[in-house]
Amino acid sequence: MHHCTDTQAVCRGCGLKLRGSPSWKAGLAFHPDPKGEVKRCHYGGWVCSRRCDIKACVELEGTMPGCGSVNSFERLSIYAKKSINSHWPEAA
């Protein structure tokens, strides 16, 4: 799991350095590639792709009490799945 620093926004899934503010500063972040997208993960933080969104949610839900052994998109909560599918509809 990758975390933003005090001044640098990073993708929570892959660690890609983004332009902009860390998510906890309530700012905006932008992908370094002009055609790239950045979305907010269901559980907070920035993600740069559907794959990174899924990875971040799986890692976070896997540490939550009562969630059992979450290890794939299929095992995520319906709320996380809905969030991912709404952020990245072209891949749903």
Image (tube, helix red, strand yellow):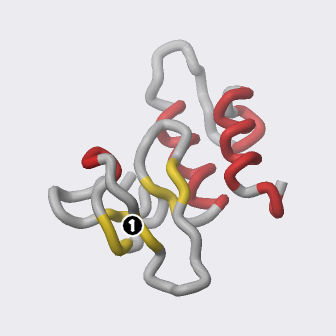
Q: Quadrant of residue 77?
A: top right
Residue 69, quarter of the rendered image? top right
Q: Indicate the position of residue 88 as horizontal and vertical percent values.
A: 72, 57
**64 over 50 or under it: above or below:** above
Q: Position of residue 1 (x, y in %)?
A: 39, 52
x, y percent for residue 4: 28, 56
Q: Amino acid at mark 1?
A: Gly
Q: At 50% across and 42% down in the image, what residue appears?
A: 59
Dot 1 surroundings within 10 Å: few (below 14), some, or many (20 or more)? some
Residue at x 35%, y 74% (from the top left corner): 19
- Farthest-out residue, bottom: 34
Residue 88 vs residue 68, the one in the foreground: 88
> Which residue is at 54% across, 13% downward?
66
* 10 sits left or right of 84 in the view: left
Task: Work out which residue is located at the far left of the displayed protein and give it.
Answer: 6
Find disc 1 in the rendering and name its residue. 15
Front-most of residues 67 and 57 = 57
User: Element under label 1?
Assistant: loop
Give the left or right position of residue 63, taking residue 74 as reference: left
Q: Position of residue 9 (x, y in %)?
A: 31, 63
